[in-house]
Image: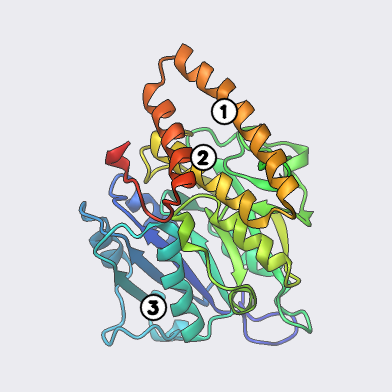
C-alpha cells in the first residue's frame, strides 16, 4: 500500500520521539515492533536520559544512524531502514525535558508530526498508519488533531492501559478514561473532544508546538501531557482516540514496574497540585480543589497504613511537601524512593 494520500500529496513525515532510560529489560521487543511498522515516512529520534544498562546501544544496533549525524528524512528506496538521530544527555533529564529535545529536532527537520512513544510498548504494524489517517493531515488549514491509539496491557491485552478521556479540573481527576477496564464496545469506537490522553503513544502535529509551546519541564514526568493538551486546545487543537490503532504497554517499565510505584506516586502527587494550580480559573477554584485533595489524601494515607505500604505513603507525603516547598523539576530518582 502506498503512503501517498488520497489527494495525491506526499504522505506526512513523522519523527518518532523516544526518551530512553535503562530499558534493557524490554527494549528488544520495542525495537522489533518498531521495525515492523507499515508506514514509510518516519524517522527515529532517541533521547537517552543517562542509561547505564546498554539499552541505548541496543537501539543503535537496531536502527543505525546516518553517518553525518543528520536528522533529515531519507527516501525509503535509499535505505532499508528509516534514519535515526541519537542524543545522549548524560543524565536522567526526565520525560518532559527529553521530549522537548526531540521536539526541537522535529521542528528543525521540518517534520509534519511528532509521535511520542514510551520504550516499554510494543506496536502493531499498522498502528502508525492508522494514527496518521485519523489526524486529518489533508485538512485545508493543516492537521489540528492530536491522535492517540488504543493502548492495552501487554500482560493482559483484554484490559485498557493508560488514560484517554476526560479530566475534571475542579478535582484534578481523570474521568471516563476506561483505564484498567475491559476492552469492549465502548473502547472500540472513535472518540473526539477528549480533555486529555497519555503521551505513552500520541501523534501530535508539529505545528502544535509552535502554537502552544513545548512541554513544561517543571513537571519532570507525569501530567505534562495534560498540561500541554490544555494549552494546545486553547489554540484550536483537539484530541481524538483512534481504536483501529493498537499498541501494548508494560505499565511503568522505566519507573520501577507495576501500576503504582513510589516514584510514580511522588511525581503524580506533586504534579497534580501544580497542574490544577497552573490552570485554576480563580483562587476559589483552587481552594475547592485543595480541600478535596487533602480530604482524599487523608483517606488514601489511612489505606496505605492499613496495608503497610510505607514507601508509597512516604512518596505521597514527600510529593505534596515538595510542591509547597517549590521543589519542581527533577527532585527524586527511582533509587531515592
- In this rendering, the answer to whether 28 lies above or below 175 is below
- Disc nearer the start of the sequence (3/2): 3
Q: Position of residue 74 (x, y in %)?
A: 43, 85
Residue 48, label in figure: none
Q: Residue drawn 34% across and 46% down?
A: 332
Residue pointed to by mark 3: 83
Residue pointed to by mark 2: 269
Q: Residue drawn 47% across and 68% down?
A: 16
Q: CA distance from mark 3 to mark 1?
A: 47 Å
Q: Give left or right: position of 106 versus 169.
A: left
Evaluate whether residue 261 shows in this view.
no
Q: Give left or right: position of 36 versus 65.
A: right
> Neighbour class for label 1 at 10 Å: few (<14), some, many (≥20)?
some
Q: Secondary structure at mark 3?
A: loop
Q: Residue drawn 45% across and 16% down?
A: 305
- Of tags 3 and 1, which is closer to the observer? 1
- Disc nearer the start of the sequence (3/1): 3
Which image quadrant: the N terminus? bottom right
- In this rendering, the answer to whether 21 lies above or below 312 is below
Do the residues bearing badges 2 and 1 touch, measured as CB atoms within 8 Å?
yes
Q: CA distance from mark 3 to mark 2?
A: 38 Å
Where on the picture, by quarter, is residue 81? Answer: bottom left
Residue pointed to by mark 1: 297
- For the residue pair 176 and 301, the one nearer the viewer reads as 301
- Disc nearer the start of the sequence (2/1): 2
- For the residue pair 296 and 311, the one nearer the viewer reads as 296
> Neighbour class for label 2 at 10 Å: few (<14), some, many (≥20)?
many
Q: Residue drawn 33% across and 69% down?
A: 63
Q: Give left or right: position of 98 versus 233.
A: left
Amino acid at each position: 500500500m502506498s503512503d501517498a494520500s488520497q489527494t495525491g500529496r506526499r504522505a506526512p513525515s513523522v519523527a518518532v520521539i523516544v526518551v530512553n532510560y535503562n530499558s534493557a529489560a524490554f527494549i528488544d521487543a520495542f525495537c522489533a515492533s518498531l521495525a515492523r511498522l507499515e508506514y514509510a515516512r518516519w524517522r527515529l529520534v532517541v533521547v537517552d536520559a543517562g542509561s547505564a544498562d546498554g539499552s541505548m546501544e541496543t537501539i543503535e544496533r537496531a536502527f543505525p544512524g546516518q553517518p553525518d549525524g543528520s536528522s533529515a528524512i531519507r527516501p525509503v528506496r535509499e535505505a532499508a531502514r528509516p534514519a535515526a538521530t541519537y542524543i545522549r544527555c548524560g543524565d536522567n533529564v526526565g520525560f518532559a525535558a527529553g521530549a522537548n529535545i526531540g521536539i526541537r529536532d522535529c521542528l528543525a527537520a521540518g517534520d509534519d508530526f511528532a509521535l511520542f512513544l514510551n520504550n516499554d510498548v510494543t506496536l502493531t504494524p499498522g498502528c502508525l498508519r492508522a494514527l496518521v489517517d485519523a489526524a486529518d493531515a489533508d485538512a485545508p488549514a493543516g492537521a489540528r488533531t492530536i491522535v492517540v491509539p488504543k493502548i492495552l496491557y501487554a500482560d493482559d491485552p483484554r484490559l485498557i492501559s493508560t488514560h484517554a478521556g476526560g479530566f475534571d479540573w475542579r478535582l484534578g481527576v481523570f474521568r471516563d478514561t476506561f483505564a484498567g477496564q475491559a476492552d469492549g464496545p465502548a473502547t472500540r469506537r472513535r472518540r473526539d473532544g477528549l480533555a486529555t490522553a497519555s503521551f505513552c503513544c500520541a501523534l501530535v502535529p508539529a505545528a502544535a508546538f509552535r502554537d502552544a509551546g513545548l512541554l513544561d519541564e517543571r513537571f519532570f514526568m507525569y501530567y505534562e501531557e495534560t498540561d500541554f493538551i490544555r494549552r494546545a486546545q486553547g489554540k484550536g487543537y483537539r484530541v481524538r482516540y483512534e481504536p483501529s490503532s493498537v499498541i501494548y504497554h508494560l505499565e511503568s517499565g522505566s519507573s520501577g514496574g507495576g501500576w503504582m510505584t513510589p516514584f510514580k506516586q511522588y511525581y503524580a502527587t506533586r504534579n497534580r497540585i501544580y497542574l490544577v494550580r497552573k490552570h485554576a480559573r480563580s483562587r476559589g477554584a483552587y481552594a475547592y480543589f485543595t480541600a478535596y485533595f487533602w480530604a482524599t489524601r487523608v483517606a488514601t494515607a489511612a489505606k496505605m497504613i492499613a496495608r503497610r505500604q510505607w514507601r508509597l505513603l512516604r512518596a505521597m507525603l514527600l510529593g505534596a511537601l515538595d510542591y509547597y516547598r517549590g521543589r519542581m523539576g527533577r527532585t527524586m530518582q527511582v533509587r531515592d524512593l
